[in-house]
Amino acid sequence: MVFNKLFGNKGLGGFVKKQFIDVIQWEDPKPEVLMWRFPLRDQEIQNGAALIVRDSQSALFVDEGSIADLFQVGTYKLTTQNLPLLTNLKNWSKLFQSPFKSDVYFFNLRQQLSKRWGTAQPVTIRDADFGAVTVRSYGMYSFSIADPVLFFRQVTGVCEEYRSELLEEQIRNLAVTNLAAAFGSADLSFLDMAANQVKLSQQMTILLRPAFAGLGLQLENFTVESITLPENLQKQMEERIGMGIVGDLARYTQYQTAQAIPLAAENEGGIAGIGAGLAAGMGIATSMNTALNPVANNTSGQTNTINADHTSQLAQLKSLLEQNLISQDDYDAAKAEVIKKITG
């Protein structure tokens, strides 16, 4: 009767079956689970039990928080011969007979593919063309566990399960930290970076691999898919690109007129108005060139050094601004050039 109270109707066989583990394995791991602890609650591992470590797995024995033996792919009969560190931790003799308690952690060594990263906040970088600018970026990366022991020490610790999404914030922070350094080491301006994302990706991979290795991980690849400026800086960049066109306003006017010819032919009046538009545009171009390059446009070959000429140039620029034929930025830049010539 006392026996039945202790062990129930199943008897001693049921008790033994409940308490002793004969086979330890991770049969059906989910792809996103990086580490899983074999359930051993109220159970002990039988001496001589089988440990099965499947392809792309490893198993780690941990005794009361102390890391013991690591097993790679294979099937093992657990004895003191293949558990040397655990044997030492428990002060076993050469041959132990009784069951033992020890945590067993399985690690998923398969590649974690197509993980996404992105900058939650803009990152400030130094650019050769624009100075200090803020950018956003995003892309993808892949990694795998390379050192299960280091990964256990640095990342997971003693928990029942560790999933890949728990790493995403840490990896995103690593990416943001190294993004500015990658721009600098790539030696490319922002305008060139969009066409050289492969080079930036390579720089990011080089910078991030040591950080991943410090966590027991292998960074397989890291790609940068997009680099964008905030809306206000994007507008400034477009205006700056437009300034390059102003540098040769005559050619730009010719181009615009040539583009307009097919449209003008379809409208009332046809191409009749094109000549007037071209003449007006060329007049603006001539005024701008005269204001910015008085010496180059002096057909008499004499050096124009009289202050009245510079005053006339400034007046021309002012007139163009008031007629909204040039922008304030264009006016300020041209005015600065004329004043520079006056002051020498």
Image (cartoon, grey):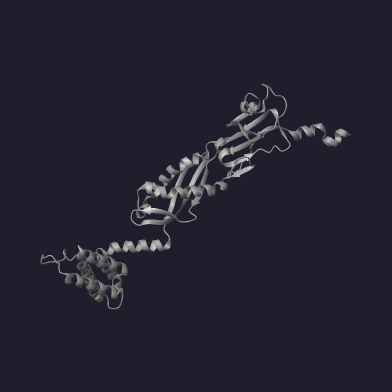
Callout count: 0
Drawn side of residue 87 relative to residue 116, left or right = right
Lateral position of residue 34 relative to residue 122, left or right: right
Quadrant occupied by the C terminus: bottom left
- Is residue 278 in view from this perspective? no
Q: Residue 195: horizontal and vertical position, in percent?
A: 36, 52
**Where 109 falls versus 271 (above or below)?**
above
Q: Dividing the image into 4 quarters, which one contains the N terminus?
A: top right
Q: Nearer the viewer, residue 73 or 340?
A: 340
Residue in the image at 28% along x and 63% along y: 245
* As drawn, 271 above or below 249: below
Q: Residue furthest front?
A: 343
Q: Going by the picture, which residue comes out furthest to the right?
A: 1
Query: Considering only vertical position in the picture, is 14 above or below 318?
Result: above
Residue 312 percent coordinates (x, y) = 19, 72
Tell me what residue is drawn at x 13 percent, y 65 percent. 303
Instruction: Specify whether residue 121 is in view.
Output: yes
Q: Position of residue 257 (x, y in %)?
A: 26, 69
- In this view, the residue farthest toward the bottom is 268
Picture quadrant of residue 152? top right
Task: Describe residue 188's horizontal placement relative to residue 316 as left or right.
Answer: right
Instruction: Name which quarter of the figure residue 156 lies in.
Output: top right
Left or right: where 133 falls relative to 170: left
